[in-house]
Every structure is written in C-alpha cells, then in structure tokens.
Amino acid sequence: MSMSTSIRLAALAAVTMLASGCVVEQPAPRRHPVVVEQPAPGYVEVIAPQAPPTVLVEEEPAPRPGYVWARGYWHWNGRKYVAMHGHWEPVRPGYHYVHPYYVQRGDGWHLNVGVWVAG
C-alpha cells in the first residue's frame, strides 16, 4: 500500500470516527400524567354488602390556592365502614378531580376512588 493511500485511509477513518460521535438527539417529549381506567394488576375490589353511612367523614376546609381538597370517604374493610380522611392534592393543569363515590350494583356497593381526569 502506498503512503498516500495509507494517509487517505487514516484520514477517512479519523473523519468517520469524528462524525460518528456527533449525534444530535432531540429531547424526549414531555408526557402528562395518564389516568388509568383499569384497576392496577393485583388490585382487589372490595364490595360492601350495605350502603355507606350518610354521615360526612369530616367538614371540608376553606379553599387553598394551588390545591384541591380530596374529600374523605367511607371505606369498607370487609367487616365495617372505616372513615378515610381527606387530604390536599396539588392542582394539575388540564385535569379535574373526581371525588370518591359509591355505586350500587347487583352484588353490592362499589367504591370508585378519587382520580384525576383530563379535561
């Protein structure tokens, strides 16, 4: 191999190595929280045989800027209803909070937990 061919091959290899290291990656798009419609794996739904108490778990506090009050609710523990106290949730732009509520079906009372919903 001649000297000029060796120089050309070395130059080509150097340019290839330099060019291969110059990868410009675009940042990943920001993803917003997704509201899961299906129960998570391992989720066990407890069905209450009787309606929850009509007594409020607690009084709703005064509004707090930047937060939504997630109301307390009655949770069926398999034997009786237990009060679950409310808590503050940070506001999520583009979402609204749906408070926990029960729905009566043929097999008993089903709790729909509080969730953030787009819109």
Image: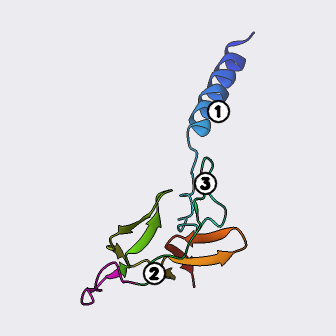
What is the number of the mark on residue 112?
none
Closer to us: 29 or 98: 98
| Three-letter code, disc 1 | Thr
Q: Which residue in the structure is indicated by mark 2?
A: 93
Q: Callout 1: helix, strand or loop? A: helix
Question: For residue 28, what is the image quadrant?
Answer: bottom right
Q: Is residue 5 left or right of residue 116?
A: right
Q: Callout 2: helix, strand or loop? A: loop
Q: Is residue 97 left or right of residue 12?
A: left
| Three-letter code, disc 3 | Ala
Q: Position of residue 5 (x, y in %)?
A: 72, 19
Closer to us: 113 or 20: 113
Q: Position of residue 101 (x, y in %)?
A: 52, 78
Q: Which residue in the structure is indicated by mark 3?
A: 40
Against 45, residue 110 (above or below) is: below
Q: Which residue in the structure is indicated by mark 1?
A: 16
Closer to us: 76 or 119: 76
Indicate which disc, 3 or 1, sits on the residue closer to the N terminus: 1
Against 41, residue 17 (above or below) is: above
Q: Which residues are magenta?
A: 55-68
Q: Quote the CA–CA distance across marks 2 and 3.
A: 24 Å
Indicate which disc, 1 or 2, sits on the residue closer to the N terminus: 1
Indicate which disc, 2 or 3, sits on the residue closer to the N terminus: 3
Q: Quote the CA–CA distance across marks 1 and 2.
A: 47 Å
Q: Position of residue 20 (x, y in %)?
A: 62, 37
| Residue drawn where x is 57% and y is 63% of the image | 29
